[in-house]
Amino acid sequence: MAERQEPGGPARVSFDGRNMRVFASGLRNPIGMDWEPTTHALWTVVNERDGLGDELVPDYLTSVRDGAFYGWPYSYFGQNEDPRKKGEHPNLVAKAIKPDYALGSYVAPIGMTFYKGESFPSRNNGGAFIGMHGSCNRFKPVGYKVAFVPFANGKPAGPIENILTGFIANEDKFEAYGRPVGVTVAPDGSLLVADDSGGKVWRVSAKR
């Protein structure tokens, strides 16, 4: 019988398409990825599961370690067992590692990029900009913004900061002017933000 494979996560493959293998697993929905500029480690943002209440489960930002298992679908944020999977695979729950940085539940991080430009303040150097698409099945909407996590020595080094907000039009009806997704740094050092609901690309620059 073939060994059960741990679900979810990025794979590593040769340029010619051969030698593919799972690099890390148990990541429910890793979308935005980038290489941290000082350690050159791979980092990603992950959309976690729904259905455990408004305050669970936190979406997160984490380094992606070769061979690591991050819990999906049996546990969340380390070894917190999902009650809907209780007792199914205790061996996988026991080996699940805790992600590096919680972003909040239902914020739906999609885009992520490390800042390698030169036009923003020095405190932004090497930090992570994150496009948060926003919640759709929570009592009150969260996300709908671009946030920033400062880094130092290759690790998160402070509280999350709001960078681009104002997208929520009607909190009670979940109406929004736009929903940020992809983020990238332009050649001039400004931040470009794709908005898949508003159909726009926003350019964010630092005031001189």
Image: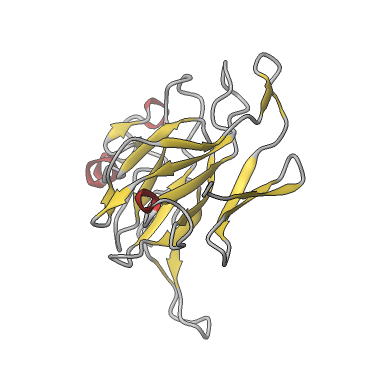
- Rendered view: 80 above or below 122: above
Is residue 104 at least partly visible in the picture? yes
- Rendered view: 186 above or below 72: below
- Rendered view: 185 above or below 160: below
Is residue 1 at least partly visible in the picture? no
Quadrant of the rendering where the N terminus is positioned = bottom left
Question: What residue is drawn where x is 57% and y is 17%?
Answer: 140
Q: Residue furthest front?
A: 208
Question: What residue is drawn where x is 45% and y is 74%?
Answer: 20
Q: Residue furthest bottom?
A: 16
In the rendering, at what x and y percent does residue 95 appear?
A: 23, 47
193 vs 116, left or right, is right
Question: What residue is drawn where x is 36% and y is 59%?
Answer: 24
In the rendering, at what x and y percent does residue 194 appear?
A: 66, 50
Front one among 119 and 37: 119
Q: Quadrant of residue 134?
A: top right
Q: Residue furthest right?
A: 199
In the rendering, at what x and y percent does residue 153 appear?
A: 23, 56
Front one among 161 and 36: 161
Question: What residue is drawn where x is 36% and y is 61%?
Answer: 36
In the rendering, at what x and y percent does residue 121 appear?
A: 41, 51
43 vs 197, left or right, is left
